Image (cartoon, rainbow, N blue to C red):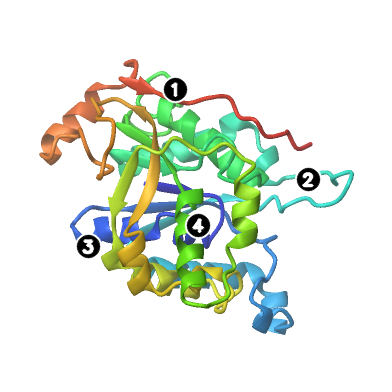
Amino acid sequence: MAVHAHPDDESSKGAATTARYVDEGAEVLVVTCTGGERGDVLNPGLKDDPHIQRDIVQVRREEMAKAAAFLGVQHTWLGFVDSGLPEGDPLPPLPAGCFYLEPLEVATEALVREIRRFRPHVVTTYDENGGYPHPDHIMTNRISEAAFAAAGDPDAYPHAGEPWQPLKLYYIGGFSIERIRTFHEALVAQGADSPFESWMERAGSRPQRQLTTWVPCSDYFDARDNALRSHATQIDPNGFFFAVSNDVQADLWPTEEYELAVSHVPTQEREDDLFAGIPSSLAEADALALGTGGAEPVLDRRVEPTVKEWK
């Protein structure tokens, strides 16, 4: 189960990994917490399209359906309203009724229901700071961590389905500084313009995450890009996502990265599979998930967030 804030996040973060696991026979569910209603139209060719301006909610749903088809994943909407990204000094208040302002227990119960219905062994989400400081990404982390802990507890949300304890919780690694530098240097060596120099400047001032898991998935970069392009309102077809060809990416950086946050199974220091440590027998893995509720995890690397609160 991959838990994301907005439609398009599933295609820009971990998409090739999900496509690979689907192709290998795993069931993968993408949970999108909000409808992305307040997202800006980032494709310059569509900014003034009257249909998009009028029907953005439906457009985002149609884009999501196309992306899910390219990745082969199942998909569900959690049903909350996009909080938008506040800008200005001072920052404006968040809109009433948005996802970030939902009571934590309300949003957590909605995700617990999906976990108990789908019964995943692995859950992926964003780190404690949201991957980047967008209120919906931060809230996605909060409810993912809370639901991961509560889903196996029979005393938590007793009307939300039969208890089920996912065995591992990961944060999506996203674009590490090493990956960005590798792509930047490749473009410079080719004499091409690089869109990544400003990224390196911004990322260089931030502490780097302690990644644990590198999933080989280069055979699925085309599926990832097709899913990305499906989100036409959000993705510039001439933007940085497509600056480095997939053949070059496969040679230079053929993986997507993750950070293991919580595990109920023994793990190793460096992984190449999100299912590492989980029994390969489905019956054994299910029995472990059913019998683990309430137990202390083998590993818990969660930390307190460092981002500010929105009001």
Visible in this render: residue 68?
A: yes
Q: In the image, which is nearer the foreground, mark 1 or mark 2?
A: 2
Q: Which residue is found at the position 42% from the left and 38% from the top?
A: 113
Q: CA distance from mark 2 to mark 4?
A: 32 Å
Q: In the image, which is nearer the foreground, mark 2 or mark 3?
A: 3
Question: What residue is disc 1 on?
Answer: 156
Q: In the image, which is nearer the foreground, mark 4 or mark 3?
A: 4
Q: CA distance from mark 1 to mark 2?
A: 29 Å
Q: Amino acid at mark 1?
A: Ala
* Tag 4 near tag 1, CB within 8 Å: no
Would residue 289 be found to the left or right of residue 296 on screen? left
Question: In the figure, 114 relative to 181: above or below?
Answer: above
Whichever of labels 4 and 3 marks the residue nearer the N terminus, that label is 3
Question: What residue is disc 4 on?
Answer: 180
Viewer-closest of 307 and 86: 307
Q: Position of residue 166 (x, y in %)?
A: 32, 33
Question: How many marks on residues?
Answer: 4
Would residue 257 be found to the left or right of residue 100 on screen? left
Whichever of labels 4 and 1 marks the residue nearer the N terminus, that label is 1
Question: What residue is disc 2 on?
Answer: 94
Q: CA distance from mark 4 to mark 1?
A: 42 Å
- Within 10 Å of disc 3 (Cα), the crowding (few <14, some 14-19, many 20+) is some
Label disc, if present, on residue 23 of the rendered structure: 3
